[in-house]
Amino acid sequence: MKSPNEELTEEKRAEIEKHENSLIVGYQKVQIAHGTHILSWHPLITHKISMMRDLNVNCTEFGCLVEEVATLICCEAMQKLEMEDYIVETPICTTVGRRIAGKKLVIVPILRAGLGMAGAVKRVVPKSRVAHLGMYRNEETKEPVWYFKKHPSDMEERAAFILDPMLATGGSADAAIQYMKDIGCKSITVMCIIAAPQGVDRIQKNHPDVEIYAGCLDKGLNEDGYIVPGLGDAGDRLFGTK
């Protein structure tokens, strides 16, 4: 195993990049749309995602990092929520405060990896409801297979935030978005930690009205449909089920 303190020379950087590129299945160049927000400009998000990539990070540490990154992404994804004024009594005087108004919120983790992000988002917006969508990937077709759906009855009144750490082929997120629309949800945002161009492209084409907030955009997918360089299977790493 390579030492984590191995010097990163230009030669080593080129060697790493060449190996990564050799793993990626070719795809057409993706144009990032206005509604897709890649948050790799944020130093804390980039720093923590790099830590998550390390295969030596155990599931407890990995889970903490997922929550920390989810919190940071949540703050960006919810910056457009409507606000209203109200009266606040401080220890000094009466003042005018600001609070979130408008649509009620629902957090929608895609099982099971999305659960790793749900707790962090729920702490930021504790009055939000939580819906659960369960699906697994068919390893032959790379498409999602449904096994569970549970959500509040008033979804048409709520803004939905779909949570899935990895936006790879985009199959699960695509299915989740369509289901949210089918039950009447009009405002939908996808939050992920790492996205692949193919997944972003699929959501942009099929759901141009949906915004995406991703911690970073990786290079592509390998022949098994996993993100490169990625971090492996987020669910397995969260729950220690490798």
Image (spheres, rainbow, N blue to C red):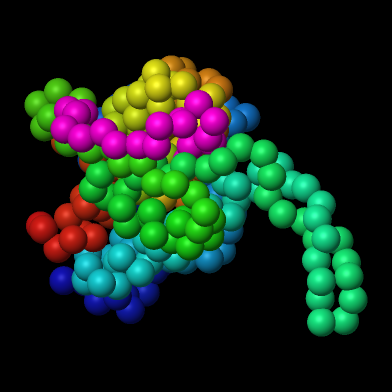
Q: Residue at x 56, y 63 (%)?
A: 43
Residue 39 at x, y percent in the picture? 55, 50
Q: Can residue 79 be seen here? A: yes
Would residue 107 appear left or right of 236 to someone viewing this image?
right
Principal SS element in the magenta part?
strand
Would residue 140 appear left or right of 54 to someone viewing this image?
left
Q: How many marks?
A: 0
Q: Is residue 66 magenta?
A: no
Residue lying furthest bottom: 91
Residue 217 at x, y percent in the picture? 44, 43
Q: Can residue 219 be seen here? A: no
Q: Quadrant of residue 134?
A: top left
Q: Nearer the viewer, residue 125 or 25?
A: 125
Q: Quadrant of the N terminus?
A: bottom left
Q: Quadrant of residue 2?
A: bottom left
Would residue 118 appear left or right of 111 to someone viewing this image?
right
Q: Is residue 156 magenta?
A: yes
Residue 159 vertical position relative to residue 233 in the rendered view, above or below: above
Q: Residue at x 89, y 70 (%)?
A: 94
Residue 23 at x, y percent in the picture? 23, 40
Q: Residue at x 61, y 37 (%)?
A: 103
Residue 60 at x, y percent in the picture? 25, 72
Q: Residue at x 62, y 29 (%)?
A: 34
Q: Quadrant of the C terminus?
A: bottom left
- Provide the residue span drawn in magenta: 144-161
